[in-house]
Amino acid sequence: MTHGVRRFHVGDRLSEMAIHNQTVYLAGQVAPDGSQDIQGQTRQVLAAIDKLLAEAGTDKAHILMAQIFLADLADFPGMNAVWDDWVAPGDAPPRATVQAKLARPEWRVEIVVTAAIISS
């Protein structure tokens, strides 16, 4: 632990999550099964986000910012359909969505979130 930073699922290149000052920072999450369509990949990514946020002691209602990267903006409606079903009602976070060339050609979506940990 360095200067109050806690890192989780640490690899040589990146950590999947870091926590500092009650704020959770996730690495970009991608689908483990890149053969699925945009809706399938988006569901996988959001499930990974849910799992990491739960591990940090928070949830999607406490997301401060989401950044969504799409390999093809034609996938925007399909991704949004899954996102809209997932997002916490009344707690839709600030969000940016851009087209980007992702690190692997099979990946259609990558999502980065920052969330708060609210102590009881």
Image (cartoon, rainbow, N blue to C red):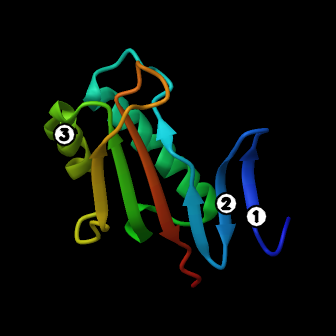
> How many other residues sit within 10 Å of disc 1, few (<14), some (14-19) or many (≥20)?
some
Q: Quadrant of the N terminus?
A: bottom right
Marks 2 and 1 close (CB-CB < 8 Å): yes
> How many other residues sit within 10 Å of disc 3, few (<14), some (14-19) or many (≥20)?
some
Q: Residue furthest right?
A: 1
Mark 2 element type:
strand
Mark 1 element type:
strand
- Which residue is identified by label 3? 76
Q: Could you tell me residue 49's position as x and y percent? A: 48, 49
- Identify the amino acid type marked 2: Ala
Label 1 or label 3, whichever comes before in sequence order: 1
Q: Which of the 4 image quadrants contains residue 2?
A: bottom right
How far apart in space, not on screen, are marks 3 and 2 (Cα)? 28 Å
Q: Could you tell me residue 67's position as x and y percent? A: 38, 54
Along the line of sight, the residue nearer the viewer: 99 or 35: 99
Q: Quadrant of the C terminus?
A: bottom right
Q: Residue at x 23, y 39 (%)?
A: 79
Q: Could you tell me residue 115's position as x and y percent? A: 49, 67
- Identify the amino acid type marked 3: Phe
- Which residue is identified by label 1? 6
- Which residue is identified by label 2? 18
How far apart in space, not on screen, are marks 2 and 1 (Cα)? 6 Å
